Amino acid sequence: MKKDLIRRIADDGEASEIEIEELLRCGGDDLKALYAAADRVRHEQVGDEIYLRGIIEFSNYCRKSCDYCGIRGPNRAVTRYRMGIDEIVDIAGEAERLGNTTVVLQSGEDVWFTGDRICEVIRGIKRKTGVAITLSIGERPYDELVRFKAAGCDRYLLRFETSDRELFGRIHPDDDFDVRVQCLHDLKRAGIQVGSGFMIGLPGGTVGTIARDILFATALKLDMIGCGPYLSHPDTPLSQGPLLEDREMYFKTLSILRLLNPRAHIPATTAFDALFEGGRDLVLTRGANVFMPNVTPQKYRALYQLYPNKPCVDEDSGQCSVCVMGRVARLGRTIGTGPGHSGLQKDEK
Ligand code: SAH
Ligand code: SF4
């Protein structure tokens, strides 16, 4: 039984790589104890509020060729779209009306959206709404990050994807692991709250890789940790990537992250719903405290498939917002009302 180990890790917020591997392999009653501990730490440290961060997938153009991603540049099967600046600002306003206190602006690495244009989007949204803004647009140079911050950008999501630099190199023909990590440090230096994370179960990884990914994410002292299952997309070089044999490992990873990062924001990412019925609700009871409703207009949704079986492609934003309110109520939790800034920065809470 690993109950003592789980209790100790929950109390200390620390674990070794070997201990994390042990937890990743646990089952039965230990599994229940791990999920319960993660839920308790979440309740005690970040409370029962679930923050809504509406995600706007504003462009699926991408200059990069990440081996796992359905909208990678070379995928000719994708019909490309790009929203206009005013359109994005209007959608952010709609997202606010639907209860989102943050909008997450996500896209491929689209060169049309220069630093100036992104700043225009940020300023437009800040003029018309009170929402916090998270960018998720890939790697950008430090001087642009500084300008994004000056324009009103609050947070930035950039996953390191895997802490195994050899694996990172193999699946990122355009990227360098050190540059990715430097970009995360640059974000911090620019005064932007940083979110990062990894894909759980990338082909070529092992249980040990997941343990090291958990430790790497923890060492970065992130404001937000976003992780989700890796799901193979048929039109990519990694199309043969199988799912993890132990499906619970996806959830165990999130729970362990909560124990080691008690005050971080941890979203129930969309990919959990692609893999499990009610997957996001389950994650919210196993350590997560953030939900990211899709507020992309319905006509674009099917074109933004990073992975197959993406949920909610036939719904519109109104339907998604009704759905999320129901989910939160059924869990006995409440919707977060403030901007939900980083729990690491106490004065902002
Ligand atoms: N272009 C930006 C944002 C869009 S991609 C960027 O790369 O940061 C957002 C995230 O989607 C990536 O960080 C990756 O972790 C995830 N993703 C891409 N393809 C995926 C797949 N096949 N399965 C699971 N997650 C995937
Ligand atoms: Fe482009 Fe991001 Fe997909 Fe890589 S993960 S191909 S950068 S959209």
Image (cartoon, grey):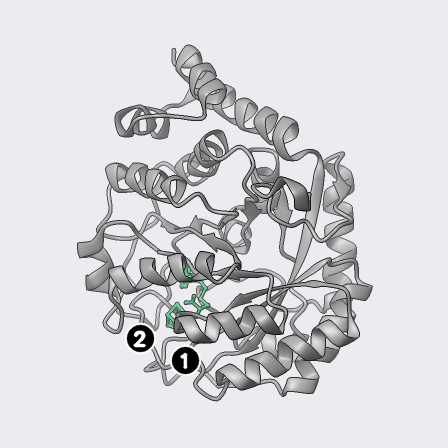
| In the displayed structure image, the side of residue 271 where residue 218 appears, left or right | left
- Is the shortest distance between ligand 2 and the CB of mark 2 under 8 Å? yes
Q: Examine the rendered structure and indicate whether residue 275 appears above or below residue 21.
A: below
In the rendered image, residue 197, in percent from the top left (x then y), is placed at 42, 51
Could you tell me which residue is drawn at 48 percent across and 21 percent down? 10
Q: Residues within 10 Å of mark 2 (few under 14, many from 20)?
A: many
Q: Quadrant of ligand 2?
A: bottom left
Residue 338's mark?
none
In the orientation shown, which residue stands out farthest toward the right? 97
Q: Name which residue type carries label 1.
A: Cys
Amino acid type at image mark 2: Ser
Q: Residue at x 48, y 70 (%)?
A: 145
Q: Is residue 101 left or right of residue 3?
A: right
For mark 1, does the 10 Å Cα neighbourhood hold few (<14), some (14 to 19), or many (20 or more) residues?
Answer: many
Q: Is residue 185 above or below residue 141?
A: above
Q: Position of residue 146 (x, y in %)?
A: 50, 70
Q: Is mark 1 within 8 Å of ligand 2?
A: yes
**Which quadrant of the figure contains the N terminus?**
top left
Give x and y (percent) for residue 288.
58, 40
Q: In the rendered view, does 144 fall on the left or right side of 74?
A: right
SS label for mark 1 = loop
The residue wearing badge 2 is 65
Residue under the image location 44 percent in, 18 percent down = 6
Q: CA distance from mark 1 to mark 2?
A: 8 Å
Position above or below: 15 against 328: above
Q: Position of residue 128 (x, y in %)?
A: 78, 75
Q: Nearer the viewer, residue 168 or 180?
A: 180
Reply above or below: 331 against 188: above
Residue position marked by numbered label 1 in the rendering: 62
